[in-house]
Amino acid sequence: MPDLTREETQSLIEEVLEVYPEKAKEIRAKHLTVNDHEVEQSKKCITSNRKSVPGTMTIRGCAYAGSKGVVWGPIKDMIHISHGPVGCGQYSRAGRRNYYVGTTGINTFGTMNFTSDFQEKDIVFGGDKKLAKLIDEIETLFPLNKGITVQSECPIGLIGDDIEAVSKAKGAEYNKTIVPVRCEGFRGVSQSLGHHIANDAVRDWALGKRDGDDTFKSTPYDVAILGDYNIGGDAWSSRILLEEMGLRVVAQWSGDGTIAEMELTPKVKLNLLHCYRSMNYISRHMEEKYGIPWIEYNFFGPTKIEESLRKIADFFDDKIKEGAERVIAKYKGEYQAVIDKYRPRLEGKRVMLYVGGLRPRHVIGAYEDLGMEVVGTGYEFGHNDDYDRTIKEMGNATLIYDDVTGYEFEEFVKKVKPDLIGSGIKEKYIFQKMGIPFRQMHSWDYSGPYHGYDGFAIFARDMDMTLNNPCWSNITPPWRKSEDTQALAAE
């Protein structure tokens, strides 16, 4: 299908909105727009970070998911208690494939579920004593843990459990970092507030632990990776490049991260921020308190990797700048071979994205390196500063949608007719049953890594394997059924 004009895209949005009652239509119209490169600030054309319309089947998560599932959960040598009923902890356990090095149950705990397992009596009488007992049991059974977080679920805020008092008392008793995180799921409009709450907890309970400690021997080339969750090994692929160019990665969090690395982060010379949405708050705090600059980088696809390596190198001396050029030259043959192999098979294919965090914009360059075009994108829980960064990455007159509903997404797909969709597990099977190639882009569909030059080879293989799989010829999408019916009628 040819690219839509601005008028056609706007007409499509209006057509999709027609089914809503007037009030819902008015609200949802503010979250759907036609991309315009001339707009400097996205707030002039799209609204974000607002409550979802009840009944429209949003695909968002909650504040607990943002804190436990994203920011704190991957810290591998801490135990993260899901304080409340068992379901939230079980659902959030190990779903994102945050790879780590260690022995599970001994010195690493990322894939284990620790829960206070609230029952009705706990709602009535409170769970403070149960939480204190749970921490005692953890210290007995898992003595090598380096700290504990208490991730509060909805009932905790509703009944008023004093998790701060319990954490302070038990932290003093065991001389250990025990962090209360008020991330009850009902807070805010999405998981985004959970990121912010978790960042504030890092600031208040972890970052200042080594202020005034001069035992750490710093170098001029110390950096920290923030907002890389090591999904499928992403952070490892990124770290290889940074270290090969001459930098020393002192900390990476949360993926494969430790509480000690968190505490050491204020000692670095530069913070490298991959997922802006989840970690910009703590990056800004460290800039204000410790004077540490931070920059965003993008390690999806060779074009963005080169841009990012050079941007990072600009903060350092000629040694690091030469190192960046050396790394780029070293991998050029490798990534060019990937492009030569897969671009002829993927050239001209059109993609629609709907993901969280950084992916709706960060992966655009990787698709373009393979000759593909992203014709629609949107965030589950983005803010307007995310869309500000997205406008220039997307083609002019393409679709941008915020907190898109299940109905809207399906209708957009039927009309735009993309060759590939990249979204989450909730959408995966709907679109596959419609006969559309689909990649689960929250956790790389059980593949990865996708970051770095190593990851680009896997990314290209996965897109080709999905798009050019012969199974799709056996499934007829709804729009082709209508086309087939018309063709038969014409005969």
Image (cartoon, helix red, strand yellow):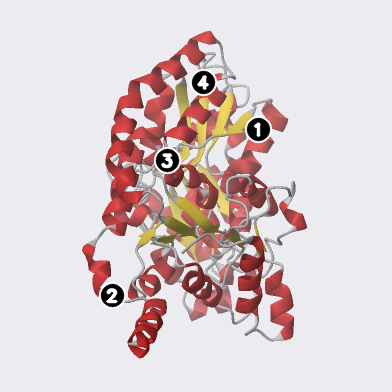
Q: Does the residue at mark 4 contact the one at mark 1 (Cβ under 8 Å)?
A: no
Q: CA distance from mark 4 to mark 2?
A: 52 Å
Q: Amino acid at mark 2?
A: Ile
Give the Cα distance between marks 4 and 3. 31 Å
Marks 1 and 2 close (CB-CB < 8 Å): no
Q: Is residue 35 left or right of residue 76?
A: right
Q: Is residue 20 above or below residue 29?
A: below
Q: Is residue 290 visible?
A: yes
Q: Nearer the viewer, residue 207 or 253?
A: 253
Q: Is 168 left or right of 432, judged from the image as shown? A: right
Mark 3 element type: helix
Residue on which the image places disc 1: 286
Label 3: few (<14), some (14–19) or many (≥20) C-alpha neighbours in 10 Å: many
Q: Amino acid at mark 1?
A: Met
Q: CA distance from mark 3 to mark 2?
A: 29 Å
Badge number at residue 222:
4
Q: Quadrant of the C terminus?
A: bottom left
Q: Residues within 10 Å of mark 2 (few under 14, many from 20)?
A: some
- Upstream in the sequence, badge 1 or badge 2? 1
Residue neighbourhood size for the residue with mark 1, other residues' Cα within 10 Å, grouped as few (<14), some (14–19), many (≥20):
many
Q: Position of residue 164 (x, y in %)?
A: 62, 54
Q: Residue at x 62, y 26 (%)?
A: 211
- Residue, disc 2: 475
Q: Is residue 4 above or below residue 76?
A: below
Give me the residue at 59% from left, 52% from top.
195
In this view, the mark in front (1 or 2): 2
Amino acid identity at mark 4: Asp
Mark 4 and mark 1: Cα distance apart in space: 15 Å
